[in-house]
Image (spheres, rainbow, N blue to C red):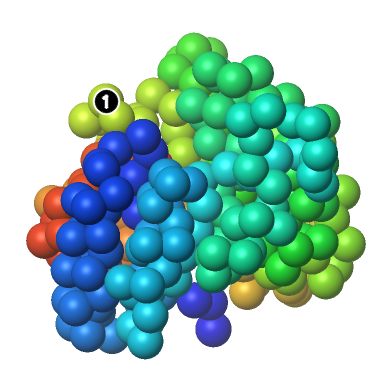
Amino acid sequence: MRKKIVAGNWKMNTTVAKGEELAAAVAEKSKETGETLLVLAPPFTHLTKVADKIKGSQVQLSAQNCAAETSGAYTGEVAASMIADTGAKYCILGHSERREYYGETDATLNKKLEQCYANGLIPIFCVGEKLNDRESENHFNVVKTQLENTVFNLNDEQFGKIIIAYEPVWAIGTGKTASSEQAQEMHAFIRRILTEKFGAKADCTSILYGGSCNPSNAKALFANKDVDGGLIGGASLKVDDFIAIATSF
Ligand code: PEP
């Protein structure tokens, strides 16, 4: 049985006080979301405060990124060990905004994956094609290559813990969502290639959809057999929308 997961990526939004308020409200309302695992990924500065607000609830904490190195002279970076020390259990890696604006390559992501595993953090690993890849019908190849260059390097034990997020770049923050059919088609493709590499273990891998997911489209997206939940950006900043998405299974 795969875990249903709805994770909120707050990106670079909210003050600490607003973040605490939002986290407390999500923790309170998480009583309505049944078995679904809720994860909040606030900015680094908010992690310890949000950890306090969700303590005792079924909500878990994630970072949005981690350093590729262990420690030392890396100004502005935050190590996976420091993230784990806040109580976070998850870490988003490979988000398209990190790939695009901060030049994250597959080589960097491999180091970050190692840092997560070395520090007990579960990666929420993002893959997804750009609009021109989809228009040129190269989207399957792009996603396959992203996985082959990174996730395929994991050992079986590491693979058993990973969460994959399929995020078509053209759908992130644009209001354009992949159709339910497009999402299922890609999720099934991802599961198939992961199964070819890792065998039946891939049946247990949660694959989340991300890209303008909201309370109106979540039900259709989550109804698909290979869509195990969502990675939510904009709508995760509104407690009622986030909880409505989390109750859309
Ligand atoms: C994201 O950035 O992970 C995301 C899915 O954003 P949005 O929901 O705002 O498209």
* 242 on left or right of 103: left
- Residue nearest the viewer, comparing 5 with 27: 27
Image quadrant assignment for residue 222: bottom left
Image position of 239 with respect to 96: above or below = below
- The residue sitting at 37% across, 72% down in the picture is 52
Q: Is residue 20 above or below residue 105?
A: below
Would residue 206 be visible to someone looking at this image? no
Residue shown at 34%/83% (left/top)?
57
Residue 142 x %, y %:
65, 28
Name the residue beneath numbered marker 1.
174
Residue drawn at (48%, 47%) of the image: 44
Secondary structure at badge 1 equals loop
Taking the image as shown, residue 88 lies to the left or right of residue 210, namely right
- In this rendered view, identify the residue nearer to me: 172 or 39: 39
CB of mark 1 near ligand 1 (< 8 Å):
yes
Q: Is residue 194 left or right of residue 191?
A: right
Q: Residue at x 37, y 87 (%)?
A: 56
Q: Amino acid at mark 1?
A: Thr
- Other residues around mark 1 within 10 Å, as few (<14) / some (14–19) / many (≥20): few
In the picture, residue 229 is in which quadrant?
A: bottom left
**Closer to us: 100 or 18:** 18
Residue 88 seen in the current view:
yes
Which quadrant is home to the N terminus? Answer: bottom right
Q: Residue 200 location in percent, x, y?
A: 75, 73
Looking at the rendered image, the quarter that the C terminus falls into is bottom left
Question: Up-down: is 236 above or below 246?
Answer: above
